[in-house]
Amino acid sequence: MDGSIAATSSADLTAFFTNMIGTLAVILVLAAFISGSELTSKFFGSKTSWKYSLFVGVLGGVFGIYGTMTGLELNGAIISVRDIGPMLAGFTGGPLGGLLAGVIAGVHRYFVGSRDSTTAQLVTYACIIATVCIGVMCGILSRKFRERLKKPWWAFLIGVVMEIFHLSLFLLIVKPFDTALGVVKAIFLPFILVNAAGFTLMITMIVYLEKQRAIALERSRLKTELEVATVIQRSLLPPITKDYPNRSEIEIAASMDPAKEVGGDFYDVFFADKDRLAFVIADVSGKGIPAALFMATSKTTIQNCVRDYPSLSEAIEIANDSLCRNNTAQMFVTAWIGVLDIPSGDLTFICAGHNPPVLLSNGTAEFIKRRSGFVLAGMEGMKYREQTVTLKKGDRFFLYTDGVTEAENSRHELFGEERLVSCLAHASAKTPDEILSDVKTAIRAHVGGAEQFDDITMLCISYQGAE
């Protein structure tokens, strides 16, 4: 190496660094924009298709051209980040993408290269061959070791190896050797570091965007599944309408507002036989999909047992044992189950760790607080004692889950039993629909805009039977 080359390399080292980093920054921004866009996959399909490989090959070639155009010349060599384009194309589009990017960038390099001397021609050929080979090699490595390449230190190592290969090929091809060696000594530090760091940043950015896109797709899929689950869960509840249950002695209203898309609360109303109406309100531990699945199992099990066994206590004991045997998730259910003999008004019920219902009678509202049994699905072999209350004509029976009394406002004050009774005391002569509407209005007034974390489920029955 002669003195002029040494002087040039020392004076322009900072300029090489600055110029290459500036060019790299532009390429990174463009690559981030394109990688983050959904247009690529929409127009060119999956990343394994040949169309996608062609697309990233052209894109990598364009990046390579831009790298050459913004590079600095030193003794016929253009010092640039041209290799970044083929390296990126090889990583994302495989050997085909890397080859195409290398050819495009190489062809452009041929036409902008100086051919005034044999040395200048050799420099051009060395750069073209190196660029094409690097694109293909990165494509092959990506196919075989893609997961490893996603790690930053692996990407940096591969980048260093590719640029060492480029400079080694330059030394082998360019003559005279002293000139080639002088150029390499002048540029090897910024050339290797910036290109390797650029390749690492590219890989890191692509991996990050891929993860974000996968997360977005997963969220979209879950949202769709939750919407379907919501519809399915709603369909499991009895379709209570104005005419249901088509008995003049009974009027029913019910509502369920899950804290999430799906919840663990449920209610059920069905005939155990011609004159016995059964109704259930329950709250499964937990929230979301697991609670909804256990809710469906619990609802079906309780309904089948109540219909199959004339004794309510026996039916609930069998239902509890069945839920315990299939309870791999170790969930449990609080429930209030009642069977109303419509002609007489006798209501037989079992409380399994659930909130006490409210009886609205003769203008008063009071809790029916009796001894409660253990929650369902908590332990096999539990015994449940039947209890009774007789409804009179005009009585209303209000059942709810703890989401009602535990609704919080911004000061973390609960709606509570006192507010519930106060609200119901003024609604004893109203229809079940009106009663539920009044309670909902009172809860909304209490909580304001505070977010709720529990399902709110209510069931109200008006008895117009025996005197």
Image (cartoon, helix red, strand yellow):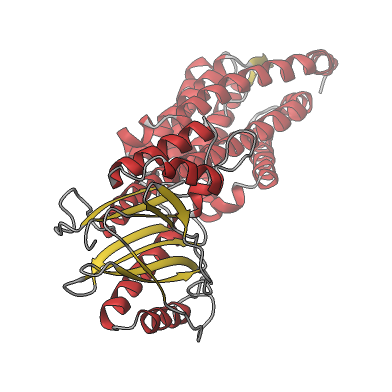
Image location (x, y in percent) of residue 284: 47, 62
Taking the spot 20% from the left edge, 69% from the top edge, the residue there is 343
Give whichever of 435, 33 is nearer the camera: 435
Taking the spot 27% from the left edge, 82% from the top edge, the residue there is 308
Give whichever of 248, 84 is nearer the camera: 248
Image location (x, y in percent) of residue 37: 43, 29
How many marks are shown on the rendered structure? 0
From the viewer's perspective, is 34 left or right of 67?
left
From the viewer's perspective, is 21 left or right of 440?
right
Image location (x, y in percent) of residue 329: 51, 70
Q: Is residue 196 above or below residue 309?
A: above
Taking the spot 48% from the left edge, 70% from the top edge, the residue there is 352
Q: Is residue 467 above or below residue 320?
A: above
- Quarter of the image for residue 391 reads bottom left
Image location (x, y in percent) of residue 163: 66, 36
From the viewer's perspective, is 173 left or right of 40?
right
Give whichever of 189, 455 is nearer the camera: 455
Q: Quadrant of the N terminus?
A: top right
Q: Is residue 46 above or below residue 385?
A: above
Q: Quadrant of the C terminus?
A: bottom left
From the viewer's perspective, is 242 left or right of 263?
left
